[in-house]
Image (cartoon, helix red, strand yellow):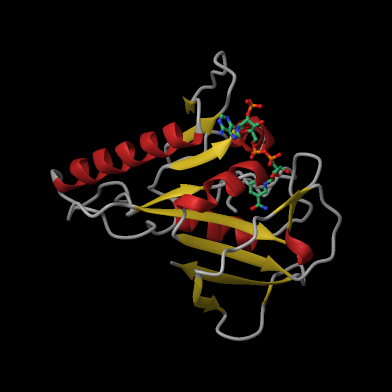
């Protein structure tokens, strides 16, 4: 995931990457994507953070989600170091049952469905804006994906609505208290990066990115 290379994990401050996809200017419904990184056994977090340091994955996260709305649980928002939130270049939507939640740079949603609706409306607005503007010198266009970016509770709840999963597998044995959701059988793996084997990070950690669709 992108960020700050900071110890808490997901927030990103790397260079802005490519947009997630072409603008949904044709009126097609946006896809609902989920993106996460997991160690062996599906561990995605421990004690409110991610128990590894993998800047390469943070850059991948930023590249994939830039220009799109991102929906997250309140605990995931809290896991970002304050200086790295909101995630730049994305509309940050935080799902919480706490009506008094307010944070600079974040939209509050009181349910997952409300969060996804806000995200789809944001994407449509971005597509309309970019259709009415010259692309020269403009910010990256919105993609045609709204991204759910965690954590464990929100991934589990959103799986029923997801049709795209981008999963970084990290070849690391580590304890954790938060796990990735099971991937339902009707998802098909459509891409592997690299096509075979693993990337090796500068730190020596091995990782690969698998994409699933349904
Ligand atoms: N490896 C990765 O890719 C990755 C990605 C993201 C996060 N993480 C890790 O995952 C952990 C956080 O995950 P988590 O499962 O503890 O928490 P979470 O899913 O981030 O957030 C849970 C919170 O979201 C709110 N929420 C969830 N469902 C809701 C609903 N239907 N309606 C309204 N509010 C709802 C509630 O907030 P309130 O309590 O405020 O009501 C709930 O306590 C951290 O360790 C983080 O580092 C890892």
Where in the image, quadrant-wise, is ligand 1 located?
Answer: top right
Q: Is 162 located above or below residue 79 in the figure?
A: below
Which quadrant of the structure image shows residue 80? top right
How many marks do you count on the picture? 0
Q: Residue at x 57, y 18 (%)?
A: 101
Q: Residue at x 47, y 40 (%)?
A: 88
Q: Is 146 located above or below residue 186 in the figure?
A: above
Task: Classify residue 53 as left or right of residue 108.
Answer: right
For this orientation, the residue located farthest to the bottom is 196
Q: Nearer the viewer, residue 119 or 57?
A: 119
Residue 143 x %, y %: 33, 54
For this orientation, the residue located farthest to the top is 100
Residue 178 x %, y %: 75, 48
Q: Is 47 located above or below residue 62 in the figure?
A: above
Residue 43 x %, y %: 76, 57
Task: Classify residue 52 as left or right of residue 73.
Answer: right
Residue 142 x %, y %: 32, 49
Q: Residue at x 43, y 32 (%)?
A: 114
Q: Nearer the viewer, residue 66 or 123?
A: 123
Which quadrant of the structure image shows residue 95? top right
Q: Residue at x 58, y 23 (%)?
A: 97
Q: Nearer the viewer, residue 62 or 24?
A: 24
Quadrant occupied by the C terminus: bottom left
């Amino acid at each position: 995931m992108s960020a700050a290379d900071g110890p808490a994990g997901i927030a990103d401050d790397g260079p802005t990457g490519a947009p997630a996809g072409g603008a949904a200017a044709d009126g097609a419904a946006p896809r609902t994507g989920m993106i996460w990184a997991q160690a062996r056994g599906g561990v995605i977090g421990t004690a409110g953070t991610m128990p590894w340091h993998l800047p390469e994955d943070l850059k991948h996260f930023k590249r994939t989600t830039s220009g799109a709305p991102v929906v997250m649980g309140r605990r995931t928002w809290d896991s970002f170091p304050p200086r790295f939130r909101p995630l730049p270049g994305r509309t940050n939507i935080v799902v919480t049952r706490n009506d008094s939640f307010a944070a600079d740079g974040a939209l509050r949603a009181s349910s997952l469905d409300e969060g996804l609706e806000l995200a789809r409306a944001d994407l449509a607005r971005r597509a309309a804006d970019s259709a009415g503007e010259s692309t020269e010198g403009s910010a990256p266009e919105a993609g045609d994906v709204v991204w759910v970016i965690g954590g464990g509770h929100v991934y589990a709840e959103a799986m029923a609505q997801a049709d795209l999963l981008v999963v970084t597998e990290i070849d690391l044995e580590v304890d954790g208290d938060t796990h990735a959701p099971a991937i339902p059988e009707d998802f098909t793996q459509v891409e592997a990066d690299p096509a075979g084997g693993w990337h090796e990070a500068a730190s020596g950690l091995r990782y690969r990115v698998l994409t699933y669709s349904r």
